[in-house]
Amino acid sequence: MACIFCSIAAGEAESYQVYRGHGLMVILDKYPVSRGHLLVIPVEHYEAVQDTPPRLLAKAWVAASALAHVYRSRLGARGVKVLTNSGRIAGQVIFHFHIHVIPYWGDGQLGRGVLTREEALSVLEMLEPHKGVVEEYLKGAGLVG
Amino acid sequence: MACIFCSIAAGEAESYQVYRGHGLMVILDKYPVSRGHLLVIPVEHYEAVQDTPPRLLAKAWVAASALAHVYRSRLGARGVKVLTNSGRIAGQVIFHFHIHVIPYWGDGQLGRGVLTREEALSVLEMLEPHKGVVEEYLKGAGLVG
C-alpha cells in the first residue's frame, strides 16, 4: 500500500507546498478545517508520534509552532490549534506522522470541503512573506546550524 | 490576576506532578478528558505557543511526545492526542502555555469530571516506571546535556 505522504515527499503526488527543508515538508491540508490548515510532515516515513525519533520530533513541532506564531502574531488569527493524532481511535487517518496547524479566524468557517486551487494559492501568497520564521525558530531552538 | 499554573509551579497550589525538570513540569489535568490526561507546562509563564521561545517549545513538545510514546508503545493505549490550544476561540482556557497529552484506551470514557484522588494516584503509579523516557527523549533530541 502506497503512503500518500511518501508519494508527495517523492514528488509523485501533488500538493501545495509551503516549506521544505531539514527533513520536513509543510503542505496545505487537502481537506482544510479552516483557511490555512497546514500539515508539518517528516519526509521520512514514521507511523505516528510514538515511533518518530526525538530529534525529528523536535524539528517538526518547532516548525509547527513557528507557523502557529505566524498565524497568531503576524497574520491576525484569533486562535490556533497545533496537534497530532495517533491511532484511528484518536482521529488519525494517514499513518505517516504529521502535525496539524489549524488557524481560527473568527468567521465561523470550520468546514471540511476539498481545498480549491484558488484558496490554496491565496494561502500560499499569505504565507510567502513569513516562511523565514520556520528557519528562525529551528535555529533559535538550536536544532539546525 | 494570579495564574494557576504559576501558582502550581511555585508550590502555592496543589497538583499531581508526574515530572519536573529542564524548565518543565508535567501534571495531571484536573478535569481529565480520559484516564491519564496530562499537561506539559513550562515553569516560566508564557501566554501560548506563539510567544514561547523556540528552545523551550522544543523541550515541551519533546517531553509531551515522550509521554505519548509511553502511552502508545508501553502502556497499551489505542490512541493518543498531543495538542495545544491558543486563544479562547480555539479552546484555550488557561493562558499559560501548556500541551495536552490525551490517551485513548478504547473504553469510550471521554468524560470531563473532576480528577479524584484515587484516580490520580493510580495514574501516577502507572506512569512511575516510565518517567525516565522524558529524560531519554530530551537527551535523544540533543536538547539537554
Image (cartoon, coloured by chain):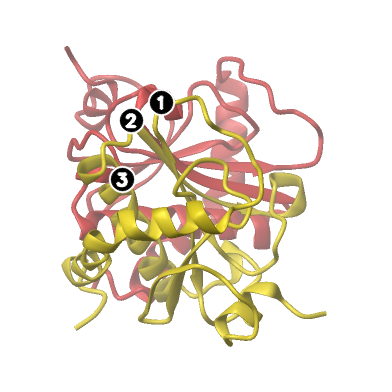
Chain colours: A red, B yellow
Image spot of residue A12 (x, y percent):
22, 20
Q: In percent of the image, x 60 and y 78: which residue is there?
A: B8
The picture places residue B1, in percent across and down from the top left corner, at: 83, 79
The residue pinned by badge 3 equals B71
- Residue A59 is drawn in which quadrant? bottom left
What label does residue B60 carry, if any? none
Chain of the residue that carries numbered disc 3 in the rendered image? B
The foreground one among B88 and A90 is A90
The residue where tag 1 is placed is B106
Which element is circle 1 on?
Answer: loop
**What residue is pinned by disc 2?**
B78
Mark 1 or mark 2: name the one nearer the start of the chain: 2
Left or right, residue B128 beside residue A10: right
Identify the image quadrant of residue A74: bottom right
Horizontal side of A120 relative to B68 (left or right) equals right
For the residue pair A73 and A84, the one nearer the viewer reads as: A84
Q: Is residue A95 left or right of residue B29?
A: left
Q: Amino acid at mark 2?
A: Arg
Subunit that carries the residue with mark 1: B
Q: Is residue B99 above or below residue A119?
A: below
